[in-house]
Image (cartoon, grey):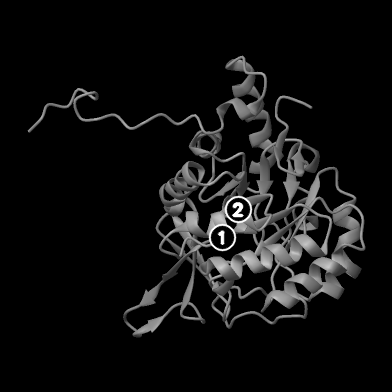
Amino acid sequence: MSRLSVRLNRLTLSNPILVASGTFGYAREMAEFVDFSKIGGVIPKTVTPLPRAGNPPPRTVETPSGLLNSIGLDNDGLDAFIQKHLEYLTGLPTALIVNIAGKNEAEFVAMASRLAEFDGIAALELNISCPNVSGGVDYGTDPDKAAAVVRGVVDACPFPVIAKLTPNVTSVPVIAQAAAEAGADAVSLINTFQGMAIDWRRRQPILGNGIGGLSGPAIKPLALRIVWQVAQAVDVPIIGIGGIQSIDDVMEFLVAGATAVQVGTANFYKPGLSSDLTAQLEAIVVEADCDDVTQFVGTLGPAKTAVQAGTPRG
């Protein structure tokens, strides 16, 4: 194993830099910009059992330091994914993590069972946290439902299982604990925050669906907080997501407790970023004279008090 290899229970990656589902297409679209051999894994856009037309336009709108999207899981369904994309994706020189979503536990289990027939899949990521479809977050906001889906998928296939969780709950650690106890190999933290953009002159929401999911640098402080909270409370490997656009962002997630990260919104405006980050990460590991990158994981110290920081009491 190299200095950059990381292990998330049953899933081993060549390095901790992944690309987030929904921001990377089916990888073909990014081949001109990304050296796939230099990233730890590819997560294509979410696949559902049957084709979905998605939400009405407009589907995206830029916000200060962020992006609101309301795509609605637009995809051609599992059969088309297998026929059109799976062979190409499994042939890439990196791990393939397939992101799946269903309306209920039975659909998740059926998809996992079908995908278990194919070689070359490194893991499944369960999208139980999409804020842009009816019922999309139901399984990510109820610990019992989250556990049932994870347990069903774990029993149905041999792949490592990652639960992608929503921040739109009172306590993410509670949901993460339920997923871990049900057998999840890791949790992805976090999916997007629900938000709105409004055209006040027309007195209308800008997005066709009204609300959407906020991503990008605007959510990084919130994502870091959630990663840190889950790392403190739950014994499960974490994949950090939220506003990563530089190697410093990567390192912040690692020291907060993430073992790996996903680059998301930045793929739209820095399409080659993910493979560039790997070399930058290796340089940091070498400079720090570390045996491997995991020596940074979870090393965040306590906050300084006002006295320790040299701030006079007022």
Q: Is residue 212 left or right of residue 161?
A: left
Image quarter (top left, top right, bottom left or bottom right) of the C terminus: top left
Query: Regarding mark 1 in the picture, which secondary structure is present there?
Result: loop
- Of residues 29 and 180, which is closer to you in this image? 180
**Vertical comparison of 106 with 223: above or below:** below
User: Residue 261, can we see it?
Assistant: yes
Q: Is residue 300 left or right of residue 127?
A: left
Q: Vertical placement of 50 versus 310: above or below?
A: below
Mark 1 residue crowding within 10 angstroms, few (<14) / some (14–19) / many (20+)? many
On screen, residue 181 above or below 299: below
Q: Which mark is residue 206?
A: none
Mark 2 or mark 1: whose residue is earlier in sequence = 1
Residue 25 quadrant? bottom right
Q: For the residues marked 2 and 1, what is the alpha-carbon distance in whole angstroms?
A: 6 Å
Which residue is located at x 44 percent, y 46 percent? 229
Q: Residue at x 76, y 80 (%)?
A: 51
Looking at the rendered image, the quarter that the N terminus falls into is top right
Residue at left 74%, top 59%? Answer: 44
Q: Amino acid at mark 1?
A: Leu
Task: Tell me: 287 left or right of 10.
Answer: left
Q: Amino acid at mark 2?
A: Ser
- 227 above or below 133? above
Q: Position of residue 257 (x, y in %)?
A: 53, 38
Q: Nearer the viewer, residue 27 or 240?
A: 240
Label 2 sits on residue: 188
- In this orientation, which residue lies closer to the viewer: 273 or 97? 97
- Labels 2 and 1 touching (C-beta < 8 A): yes
Image coordinates for residue 186, horizontal then vertical, percent:
65, 49
Identify the disc placed on residue 165.
Answer: 1
Coordinates of residue 15 in the picture (x, y in percent) = 71, 35
Q: Position of residue 298 (x, y in %)?
A: 52, 33
Tag 2, which secondary structure?
strand
